[in-house]
Amino acid sequence: MDPCFLWVHDFPLFLPSDQDPQRLESSHHPFTAPRETDRELLFSDPSRAVGEHFDLVLNGEEVGGGSIRINDAVLQKHVFKNILQIEDIEEKMGYFFEALDSGCPPHGGIALGLDRLVYFMCPSALSIRDVIAFPKSADFHDLMTGAPSLPDEKTKALYHFNHFNPTAASCTLCTSPNPPPPAPPVTARSSSSNSSSPTLPSPPSSLIREPESPHHESSSHCHHTQVKTREDND
């Protein structure tokens, strides 16, 4: 079949919820802007509003999609609070409304599935894996690079990971009665060196902290490598 592209547009902005037909949910995402002529419908009859949402289809298969987004803080707040009925919206999205209210130009775009697009345009391809440069195995391993894999001892020493125990409550250097020696410092490689092993320059002296003495058992005073877990959802 010859490549045949098709644009799909004029989607309804909202659809009845599967869980509660009396409530509306976004047909694309809650940031999608309404068609300009349907803007007032969001305050009178949002179920009739058409969204600025579009899909690109190739031979019956979706290969891309996108939308124009709402750039008006008042309209976006109305969608969240009065149409989608999201609770505590000021607490959850106050920062976003403030950003929109500061002056946000119209914006939008489209996301293309490049691998899918090439796959559908290559009749000889039996699977999308045939057009991916580095396809992953069934257990998500990259056969070209071997990733993901465990670091070797040299790499762990280079980044000072060799003394960190992720299951311990604090750094093992601070709690061990006989702390092991620190990892060797990283030195800059001379431009005339023929070594193929990667090296990194030493950090500036202003970034190096002197070890505290004596060692503290509290993890809040630990000066060695720690792993910080992000608590936000970004």
Image: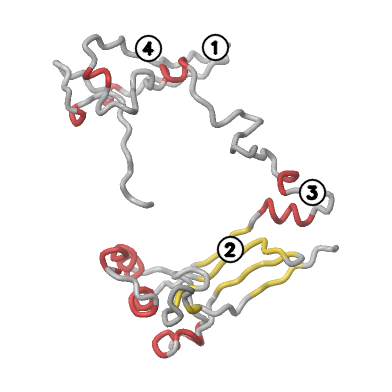
Residues at circles 4 and 2 in contact by the CB criterion of under 8 Å: no
Residue 162 or residue 18, whichever sits in front? 18
Indicate which disc residue 184 carries: 4
Mark before the other along the chain sequence, 2 or 3:
2
Where is residue 210 drawn, in percent x and y?
Answer: 21, 19
Where is residue 211 drawn, in percent x and y?
Answer: 21, 18
Mark before the other along the chain sequence, 4 or 2:
2
Q: Nearer the viewer, mark 1 or mark 4?
A: 4
Element marked by disc 2: strand
State the separation of the CA atoms marked 3 and 4.
Answer: 51 Å
Mark before the other along the chain sequence, 3 or 4:
3
Residues at circles 3 and 1 in contact by the CB criterion of under 8 Å: no
Local packing at callout 3 (Cα closer than 10 Å; few below 14, some 14-19, many 20+) is: few
Where is residue 82 drawn, in percent x and y?
Answer: 34, 80
Indicate which disc residue 110 carries: 2
Residue pictured at 33% horizontal, 22% vertical:
164
State the separation of the CA atoms marked 3 and 1.
Answer: 50 Å
Q: Which color scheme is applied?
A: secondary structure
Indicate which disc residue 192 carries: 1
Quarter containing the N terminus: bottom right
State the separation of the CA atoms marked 1 and 2.
Answer: 48 Å
State the separation of the CA atoms marked 2 and 3.
Answer: 27 Å
State the separation of the CA atoms marked 1 and 4.
Answer: 22 Å
Residue pictured at 54% horizontal, 31% vertical:
148
